[in-house]
Image (cartoon, rainbow, N blue to C red):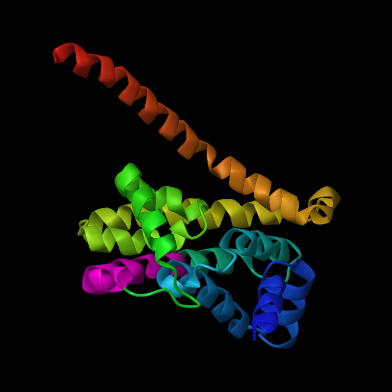
Amino acid sequence: MFHALVEFLRTLTTPEKLIELLTTVFTGWLGYALLVGIIYAETGLLTGFFLPGDSFLFTVGVVAGAAQLNIYIVIPLLMAAGIAGDSTGYYLGRRTGQHIFNRPDSRFFRREHLLRSKAFYEKHGGKTIVYAKFIPIIRTFAPFLAGVSGMNYLRFLAFSVTGVTLWVCGITTAGVLLGSVPFARQNFDKVVLGIIALSLVPIGVEALKARRRRAAATPAAESGD
C-alpha cells in the first residue's frame, strides 16, 4: 500500500506521468475532478498534509502549458477547491477542535504537526492563512486553527481567498511559463523548491520587521521600569 501511495504521489508531480493518467484513466471532467479533490483534501482534511500541493500545482501548470488541460478552467476550479477546503478545515476546528487536539498519533495524524502549526498561527495571527499556503503541513492545519480560535468567518474568508488566489495562480502560472524551458524540465524539483523559496520571502521580511519591533520595544520597556 505504501509503495502504491508513493507511486501515486510521484505521478502527481511528474508531468509525463500526470498527462498519461489524465489521458488514459481520468479523462475529460474526471481529470478535473481528480485535481479538485487533491487540492480540497490537502487544504480541508487534516489527513491530507502529505499531499504535494506546491509541486502538484506546478506540474498542473506544466501539463496545461502542454495543452493537456485548459488553464482557464483548471485555475478557477482549483481556487474554488482551495477555498472550500479552507472553509471545511475552519468549521472542523470550530466544532471538534479540542477533541482533535487530544487525539493520539496515528499513521495519518501527528499532534506534532498540529502543535507546530499552532505556534506559527499564534505568531502571525490572521496572516497565517495567507502565509501558510506556501508552507507544507501548516497549509493544512492553519484553517483548522482559525476555527479553533474562533476567528470571525468573514475575516477568515478574506484571508483564505487572498492566500488561495496567490498560491494557485502564482504556482500554476509559473508551471505554464517554465514548463517548456529545457532547464526547468531537467531540474524540475530544484525549480519547484526555488519557487517555494521565493514565495517565502514575504514571510521572512515580516518576521524580520517583527523582530526589529520587539528589539525596539525592549529598551523602552526597560527604561520605564
Q: Residue at x 34, y 72 (%)?
A: 88
Q: Which residues are magenta?
A: 81-102
Q: Is residue 200 visible?
A: yes
Tell me if residue 89 is in the magenta stretch: yes
The dominant secondary structure in magenta is helix
Q: Is residue 91 visible?
A: no
Which residue is the extreme one toward the top?
223
Q: Is residue 8 left or right of residue 158?
A: right
Left or right, residue 58 beside residue 37: right
Judge whether 3 appears above or below 102 on screen. below
Q: Is residue 51 magenta?
A: no
Residue 13 against residue 119 in the figure, above or below: below
Question: Which image quadrant for residue 5?
Answer: bottom right
The answer to whether 202 is drawn above or below residue 190 in the figure is: above
Residue 143: name its quadrant.
bottom left
- In the rendered image, the quadrant that contains the C terminus is top left
Q: Quadrant of residue 146?
A: bottom left
| Residue positioned 35% across, 69% down in the render | 89
Name the spot of residue 25 as percent of width and height, x first.
70, 88
Left/right of residue 178 with respect to residue 93 in the rendered view? right
Looking at the image, which residue is at 52% across and 74% down?
36
- Of residue 178 and residue 207, the one placed in the foreground of this image is 207
